[in-house]
Image: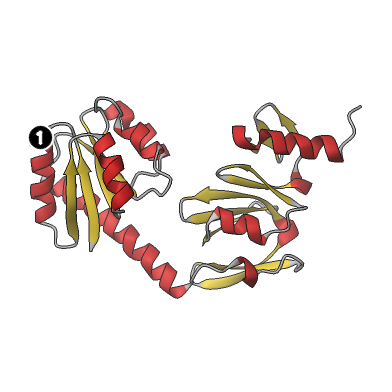
Amino acid sequence: MLRCIAIDDEPLALRQLAAYAAKIPYLQLAATCNNALEAQQLLAAQPVDLIFVDINMPDLNGVDFVRTLTERPMVIFTTAYSEYAIEGFRLDAVDYLLKPFSFSDFSRSAAKANSLYELRRNQREAAPEPTPEAEPKDKEYISVKADYKVSLVRIADIVFLESEGEYVRMHLCDGSTITTLFRLKNMETALPSEFFMRVHRSYIVNLRCIKSYVKGRIFLSDTEYVPIGENYKEAFQRYIDTNFKNL
């Protein structure tokens, strides 16, 4: 059962969402909210699995509201404005419903969310997230559970790591990637700090793989780079100043 809420400043739209949700057996509509600020207070008290949220709302629009969520549920945007679609998917939205949408459209989006929910739940049960203690820092390899198997990854071969919500995508020196159910903060603890540094809320880099850097960017090849977050710039510059001599 997916616990969800609906957020829209139009009462008629909320009634339609509630009516549609009532027809789908695996959806439990916990509440409806008239604005994003009301939804923020509700989510602080009772987390949910899925949010249906309008984008064009007063005070705080749906896109900015989703950006404020540190523990982000699945999101389905509902809006009359198609130009917001790209921004919605940049936030890893499950789907984007363009008003006016039918029950068939709503049902399809809900089914996508339910499939993703079931996939994540099955992966958690089949491969529980390892703890930092399970991956000693002095080992040359790290074991990674992905695609229903355990892969041994040489730590030195990891170029950088990228957060994707509850998952981490590992980019390796041969160009391949591995996606595993493992939060970035846990990976940061598990990897040797003398070789790996968190440089952004969504990125950890292998310091030995840095080719160059400019303001706000770390290049790991001639074309591949990761951003440097504002909160990490000082620590990164301190590392550079300590370990490299300026000529």
Q: Nearer the viewer, residue 164 or 244?
A: 244
Q: Is residue 236 left or right of residue 48?
A: right
Percent of width and height locating residue 236? 72, 38
In what quadrant of the picture does the N terminus appear?
bottom left
Q: Is 31 placed above or below 24 here?
A: above
Residue 177 location, quadrant = bottom right
| Disc 1 secondary structure class | helix
Question: From where the camera sits, is residue 28 visible?
Answer: yes
Tag 1 residue: 11
Pick whichever, 46 or 73, lies toward us: 46
**Which residue corresponds to the image point at 83% horizontal and 34% vertical from the top-left?**
241
Residue 96 seen in the current view: no
The quadrant holding residue 211 is top right
Front residue of this view, candidates 43 and 237? 43
Query: Going by the image, does 5 lie left or right of 135?
Result: left
For the point 17% across and 53% down, which residue is it? Answer: 29
Residue at image location 77% in from the left, 53% down from the top:
194
What is the x, y in percent for residue 165? 46, 51
